[in-house]
Amino acid sequence: MIRQNKLVKQIEEHKQAIEDFNKGNEKNIISTGSTLLDLAISGGRIRGGGIPAGIMVEIFGPPSCGKTILLCEIAGNIQQQGGNIMFHDPEGRLNKQFAKLFGLDIARMDYSMPNTVPEVFQSVRNWNVEENKIHGIFTDSLAALSTDLEMKEDSDKYGLRRAKEFSEECRKTCRVLPQKGFLMVCSNQIRQNIDAGPYGQKYITPGGESIGFYSSLRLRCSIPQKIKKTKTVFGKEETRTIGVGIQVEVYKSSVWKPYHIAPITILHDYGIDDINENLKFIKAHSNKSIYTIGNRELSKSIAKATSMVESNNLENEVKEEVITLWEKIEGEFKKGRKEKH
């Protein structure tokens, strides 16, 4: 009986600790636009999860896997919370029409097209903005950055100076992010590692090892799977690729636990389809043959179920059910070991 009372007390203290953490940090968390990815990143620390401010994040993966879209979703959420955005676009791919999909206003951001590594990181250290808000710094992508040596003299053919500059600049910048509450999110490409050998990493990210070392959170996107849609137009069937499905793995984390994986649906003219994945998650764990919200049946068709959610403004209700269900599943993996201290 005494042991049971002690266990109940420990559970209550744990719940209170989580509530205290939530109260102190809910304003310092930014959503990725995907409920399941937010939970994979920090769902065990704060209800609903998300990315905390004051860190550097690297999102890497193969071409066309949604890295830029993830950056824009996060940047748009920061702007909606009243924060400022610095967007480095060395590839020159961001445009107003694309940005609008994510509620991102280019006119309200500090936009630039830097050429070199120091240009990016020096601007971070020199950025003066209002305190007590999350401000975001985005670079798309690190792989496109060069060095002064390469730009002026064309003598850094193997990129050795670039790796050193990444290391130097990260070392000088890493303290600034938590001090000023900045969230720095960078996309990166992958390269085949020809020196890997039979047991080494098959793929690596360009720029040396410093980015991975200084990033508190690294998200690895999988090879995209095409999503196709067929419609009958003028009596003839037409098929188009309307988006991609990817898996995002928390490859490294100083935020919570690593190696959680989240499925994400990305539509080309919409961005992350959070409702779609949330409904699939609920169905997969409810043993039902129909999409539901609570005890309410929607449809056997994901398209119709999504439409019903949107037309009845049930997005938050679906999200809450996913968070609660995810927490129950995650709770089954807690061992309940005695605390060391």
Image: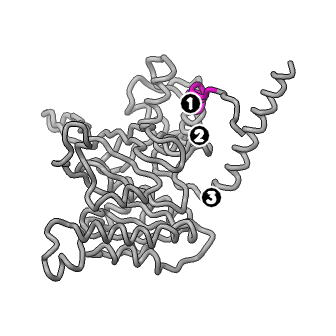
Q: Is residue 307 visible?
A: no
Which residue is disc 2 drawn over? 44
- Residue 266 image point, x, y percent: 34, 45
Give the residue displayed 25% in from the left and 42% down from the top.
200
Q: Residues within 10 Å of mark 2 (few under 14, many from 20)?
A: some
Give the residue displayed 21% in from the left and 52% down from the top.
191
Describe residue 96's horizontal placement relative to residue 196 as left or right.
Answer: right
Q: Residues within 10 Å of mark 3 (few under 14, many from 20)?
A: some
Q: Quadrant of the C terminus?
A: top right
Compare marks 2 and 3 and give the one earlier in the sequence. Answer: 3
On whether residue 330 falls in the magenta region, the answer is: yes
Which residue is disc 3 drawn over? 27
- Magenta region, residue range: 327-335
Q: Is residue 253 visible?
A: yes
Which amino acid type is marked by label 1? Glu
- Residue 312 image point, x, y percent: 53, 39
- Residue 300 image point, x, y percent: 41, 23
- Asked if the residue at tag 1 contacts the one at tag 2, i.e. Cβ–Cβ closer than 8 Å, the answer is yes
